[in-house]
Image (tube, rainbow, N blue to C red):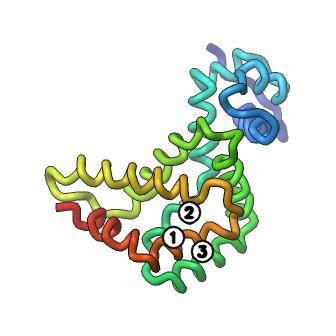
Amino acid sequence: MARPKYTEGDVQALDKLEQAFWEALEQTPYAKMSVRGIVAAAGLNKNTFYYHFGTLDDLARYCVNRSLPSELGKIVFLQGSTAGTRAFEQALASQTVKRKFARVRLMLSPNAQALQGIVSDELVSIWKSILSEPSAGASEQRDLLLKFAAGGLVKALHGKLESEYAPTVDSLRTSGALDGLIKALEDPA
């Protein structure tokens, strides 16, 4: 398939598809979205969509990956609730991070119920980039713990405002609930 052609200043097709995806998700449950609706909203044709993505799920993974802020994953591992909250609040001062957290809220909305597995998978990827490599044989156990933790965090944040994310994680940390898990993740042997 030929590569789409652009003139200088044109909005790229990927950007149009991503924007159309987020706008559609605000109005329509993900389970009811379609490639046809996305390309129509983006002002593109299906060939352009399929040049970049094989399925709507592939577009969703792309959008979640680009929009899930690493700060969300990192606040779990920041030492001390005060330091974690301060670092999180500093990150939120950035307009880019604010926009990403607004999209996290959309990802955790009732319209995006079907996306929450993808969000969990992305959190696992963020955490793997933070943690050191596990010892031989401990990788499978760590992956299981990461998936468990990501699913729990997604559920804990579901339906909350972005401003409630850091206090929710702080509450989990101060309760001691995350301490054992973090210790096990840092040294799963």
In this view, 180 is above or below 143: below
Query: Residue 13, located in which quarter of the rendered image?
Result: top right
Callout 3: SS: helix
Kindly report the distance in space between the C-alpha atoms of the residues bearing marks 1 and 2: 6 Å
Residue 33 visible in the snapshot: yes
Q: Nearer the viewer, mark 3 or mark 1?
A: 3
Q: Name the residue beneath numbered marker 3.
A: 167
Query: Residue 161, located in which quarter of the rendered image?
Result: bottom right
Q: Name the residue beneath numbered marker 2.
A: 72
- The disc, 3 or 1, on the residue closer to the chain's N-terminal end is 1
Q: Name the residue beneath numbered marker 1.
A: 75
Q: Is residue 76 left or right of residue 144?
A: right
- The disc, 2 or 3, on the residue closer to the chain's N-terminal end is 2
Callout 2: SS: helix
Q: Are marks 1 and 2 in contact (CB under 8 Å)?
A: yes
Residue at left offset 32%, top offset 54%: 145
* Label 3 packing within 10 angstroms: few (<14), some (14-19), many (20+): some
x, y percentage for residue 96?
71, 61
Q: Is residue 20 left or right of residue 68?
A: right
Q: Is residue 67 left or right of residue 134?
A: right
In this view, 126 is above or below 21: below
The three-letter amino acid code for the residue at tag 1 is: Ile
Kindly report the distance in space between the C-alpha atoms of the residues bearing marks 3 and 1: 10 Å
